Amino acid sequence: MGDVLAGIHATWEFDTDSVLIRFERGIRTPKLFQSLRERRVPYAALSSVTLTPGKRGTVILRAVPRPGADPLVEAAAGQLKDGCDPYRLVLPAERATLAEYYADELRALLGPDAAEPAERFLVAAPEAPMQFKAYDGRAAFDGQRVSFRWFWTGASTAKWKAGDQTFPVTELSGVEWRSPEGFEGCLRLVPRGLENTAPEPAPGGGAGLAADPGAVRCPQPMASRPSRADQDPAAVVFGLGYGPVHESLPFAAAVLESVRRNHSAAAVPAAVLASAVRRDPADIAERIRHLGELHVAGLVTDDEFSAKKAQLLAEL
């Protein structure tokens, strides 16, 4: 469309295949928006568009992402408050007609698979490296590894005994993020192979942390997941001022995207990989011709010629 729609805290710039959401910087702008800065959302990543009345003389234009299309939304798992939803654009009520026009334009651009979950992430995750300070340790992610460095003032005895932790993303199957604004806030990794293992109820009848579709393998063997995040060396715990949404959620999204990407690469069938490296037939023919010249010149034995020729033909 090539148009721009400016709202409160954000501006949407419409392109031919995507919308670029630029977030404002300012005291009243949610810190998550300031952390994200901008996000390019392909129309193929959207499932629907809504326009509803807002509070205090406003209207809200919202693009609804497809399940599985955005790592940030997947990591948040429905825990974000409306005011921190990066897909909501709040506009003054007098711009309702203009907002309705753009809502209709966006609906017309939705893809044929809009009603279906996305098979892969279509929106880019926040970029590594990144880090944040939790209550019991510092979490860091360099794009390949997640590391936890414990604080002696906050870490449990179990974590001190386990020592500082490093988890390659190749050993993770997912990430669980519990908002610091809720009960038992934490960032928890689940070891691969333990993704279907639910923690036992916490002592005293507490529920503990719920089972999670994501996981990480600890450097030391673990028979099961600890019931509480403060006892789990694959988790950091949030607290007042520790692990805020604008730092821990982008972190979780970046790790989740890297984990999924590595899993997808590992899942490529061997036959597909083999076909991807097949050479151009003309190149094979040229190499066989050159090999034949070496054979005629006596530089390659009969056995070497036959074996190498068979190897080259197998690459076709």
Image: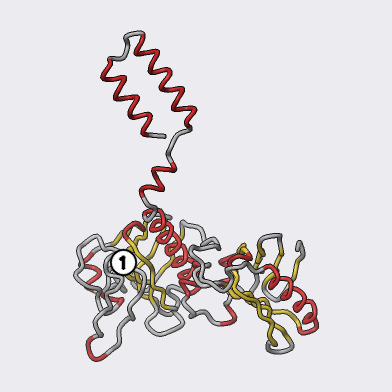
Judging depth in this view, the residue of 57 and 230 nearest the camera is 57
Residue 246, image x, y percentages: 51, 71
Q: Residue at x 37, y 67 (%)?
A: 174
Q: Residue at x 27, y 72 (%)?
A: 232
Q: Amino acid at mark 1?
A: Trp
Q: In the drawing, does residue 225 fall left or right of residue 13? A: left
Q: Quadrant of the N terminus?
A: bottom right
Residue 33, image x, y percentages: 59, 70
Label 1 crowding class (10 Å Cα cut-off): few <14, some 14-19, many 20+? many
Q: Where on the picture, by quarter, is residue 266?
A: bottom left
Residue 245, image x, y percentages: 49, 74
Judging depth in this view, the residue of 170 and 90 nearest the camera is 170
- The colour scheme is secondary structure
Q: Where on the picture, by quarter, is residue 293?
A: top left
Q: Vertically, is 288 above or below 266? A: above
Q: How many marks?
A: 1
Residue 220, image x, y percentages: 21, 62
Question: Which residue is under mark 1?
Answer: 150
Q: Vertically, is 135 above or below 13? A: below
Q: Residue at x 57, y 77 (%)?
A: 84
Q: Where on the picture, by quarter, is residue 274?
A: top left
Q: In the drawing, does residue 172 fall left or right of residue 16? A: left
Q: Residue furthest bottom?
A: 205
Q: Quadrant of the C terminus?
A: top left
Please, what secondary structure does the residue beneath circle 1 have?
strand
Q: In the drawing, does residue 8 fall left or right of residue 116? A: right
Q: Residue at x 77, y 75 (%)?
A: 101
